[in-house]
Amino acid sequence: MRSDNVTKGPERAPNRSLFYALGYTDEELERPLIGVVSAFSEIVPGHMNLDKLAEAVKAGVRMAGGTPILIPAIGVCDGIAMGHIGMKYSLASRELICDSVETMFMAHQLDGLVLVPNCDKIVPGMVMAACRMNVPAVVCSGGPMLAGSYDGQEVSLSKMFEAVGAYKAGLIDDAKLDECTHGCCPSCGSCSGMYTANSMNCLCEAIGIALPGNGTIPAVYSKRLQLAKHAGMAIMEMVNKGITARQIINERSIRNALTCDMALGCSTNTVLHLLAIAYEAGVPIDLKLFNEISAKTPNLCHLAPAGPTHMPDLYAAGGIPAVQAELAKKGLLDLDVPTVTGKTLGENIQGARILNDKAIRPIENPYSPTGGLQILWGNIAPDGCVVKRSAVAPEMQEHSGPARVFNSEETAIAAIYAGQIVPGDVVVIRYEGPKGGPGMREMLNPTSALAGMKLDKTVALITDGRFSGASRGAAIGHVSPEAASGGPIGLIEEGDIIHIDIPNASITLEVSDDVLAERKARYVAPEPNIKTGWLSRYARMVTSANLGAVLK
C-alpha cells in the first residue's frame, strides 16, 4: 500500500509516532488510510451539511475495513461572491483546490480518497486532483437544495437575481423583493436548479466517478447519508482491486458525460470543467466534440432556469439513471464503461425508467432533437464561445443587433439598471476573461437583470467572462481568445452590428477584415485589473477558456 511509506518499518518510526499523537492505533495503521476530503464550512449553504456526510463516509470506510482520515478543503459560494470582486476568486479557486488535494494526498501518502464537495468549483477541482494523481477516488457530493416558494410558485436562486431586475424596473415593490429573498433558498444544499453545482454533481455520476444518486438525492434526505456510507465502502473496493481514477475517467466515459450534459441541459460552466478534467486525465478533447455530441443528443430536461422543474423533481422522476436509460434506447451511451460501483454503466441502469415525464421527457418526445449546449464560432470568437441553447427563447435563436460595449461587469449592470439597454441590443462585456478579469467572473447579475426587466427575449449578451448556470436568455460566454489576450472581442465598437445564429453555430461581427485590421493596429491594451496577490500570478499562468482555463 502507498501508506506503507509512512507507517511501516523502523525508518518510519518517527512518522508512526505522529500518527500515535493523533490517537491512531496499530490496528488502524495496518489498514488502508483513506482521505475523506470535506469542503464543509459555515459560509457555503451547499456545504453546511458536509460534516454529517463526511462522518457517514467515515462510517462506510470503517465498515469495509479502512481507516478514514478527515482532510479539509476550501470552497467559494458563488452566490455570495456574485456581483463584486469576490467572483474573481471563484474559478481560480478550482486550481487551488486541485493543488491542495494533491498536496495533502501526496504529503501523507494515503491509499485512496473520498471527495466530499458540493458547489461549483469544488467538484471539478477535487476530480481534477484525483485524475492528475491517478489514485482510487469516489465523489460523494452534498446534494441539491429543495425548491423555494415565491408568488405561489416553486422557485430557485435564479428567480432571486431576476427579482432584483424586476425591482429596479419598478415591476415589484419592497415587499415582493423581501418575500423572494426569504423564500427562494429554503434548505441546505446546492441551489436547486440545473446550475453549475448540480450539473457537475450529475456529470460525476454520469462519468462513473460517483455512485448512482449522487447528482439528485436532495441534501436533506436520509438517503444522502446512506449514499455516503456506500461511498466509503466503494472506495475500499477500489483500493483493494487497484482501480484508479483514470480507469474510470477516460475518453469513453467523458463522451458519456458529454452526452448526459446535452440531455440534461447543464450549465455552460461544464464546458470549462470537463475540458479541465479531461486535461488532467490525459484525454485530448476540444470544443468540436461538444457540438458533435450535441448534434445527435436530444435535450430531455428543462430544469430551472430553462423550465419550471427543479432537482427534487429530477430525483423523483428517476434521476440520472432514468436519463441514461432513455439515451441508451438510441445507442447514445457506451454501456460497457466501468464505474465506482464495481459494475458497468449498463449494469447500473438496468431497470431504470422515467417515473415523471414532466421532469424527464421520453427520448421519442424531447424538448429538442439536439443538446442543451452549443459552441459558436466566428470572427468575434475564432477559438469558440458557448451558449446554453436550451435556456434561449425560440425568437432569440437567431438575432442581429447593435453592440453596446462595456469593459467591465460593473459598467454593464449600471447601464442595464439605468434603463439604457433597449430591445434589439447586443450587450458586450469584455476584459472579464481568465486573464482579463482575472478569474473569469460569472455575469449572473446582468443576465438576471435583463430577464427581470423582461428583456431576455429581445436582448443578447456576449462576454469573454462566463455565466452562472442560473443564467437564461441569449447569454454567450467564454469568447476566445479573450480581450486581454488580444482577441477580436476587444475590437468591437459601440453600434457595430453583431449577428448571432445559434442553430448554425455562428457569431459574426459585421465589420470588414480591413476595418478590424485597422482597429487592431491602433489598439492599446489596458492596464491589468489586479497587479498583486495570487490572482496576479493566476493571470500570468492561466490558459484560454477554450482550453478549460487550466494553469500551465
Image (spheres, grey):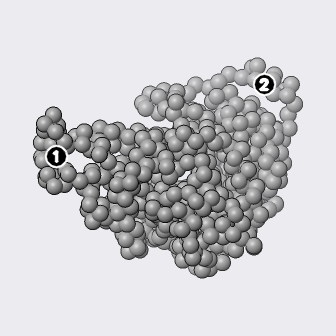
Report which quarter residue 484 is drawn in. Answer: top right
- The answer, for residue 188, to whether it is visible in the render is yes
The x and y percentages for residue 286 are: 66, 41
The tag on residue 19 is: 1
* Placement of 78 over or under 328, stated as above or below: above
* Placement of 18 over or under 295, stated as above or below: above
**In the structure shown, which secondary structural element does the residue marked by tag 2 occupy?**
helix
CA–CA distance in space, label 2 to label 1 = 64 Å
14 left or right, relative to 516 = left
User: If the image is split into quadrants, where does the N terminus sit?
Assistant: top left
323 left or right, relative to 34 = right
The answer to whether marks 2 and 1 mark residues whose Cβ atoms lie closer than 8 Å is no
Q: Which residue is drawn at 79% across and 57% down?
A: 396
The x and y percentages for residue 196 are: 55, 55
Sooner in the amino-acid sequence: mark 2 or mark 1: 1
**In the structure shown, which secondary structural element does the residue marked by tag 1 occupy?**
helix
330 left or right, relative to 543 = right
Residue picked out by circle 2: 519
- The answer, for residue 115, to whether it is visible in the render is no
Q: What residue type is labelled 2?
A: Arg
The x and y percentages for residue 385 are: 70, 43
Q: Which amino acid does label 1 sit on?
A: Phe
Badge 2: how crowded within 10 Å, few (<14), some, or many (20+)?
Answer: some
Of badges 2 and 1, nearer the viewer stands: 1
Q: Which residue is drawn at 64% across and 60% down?
A: 333
Q: Which residue is drawn at 67% across and 66% down?
A: 327
The tag on residue 294 is: none
The x and y percentages for residue 61 are: 30, 61
Badge 1: how crowded within 10 Å, few (<14), some, or many (20+)?
Answer: some
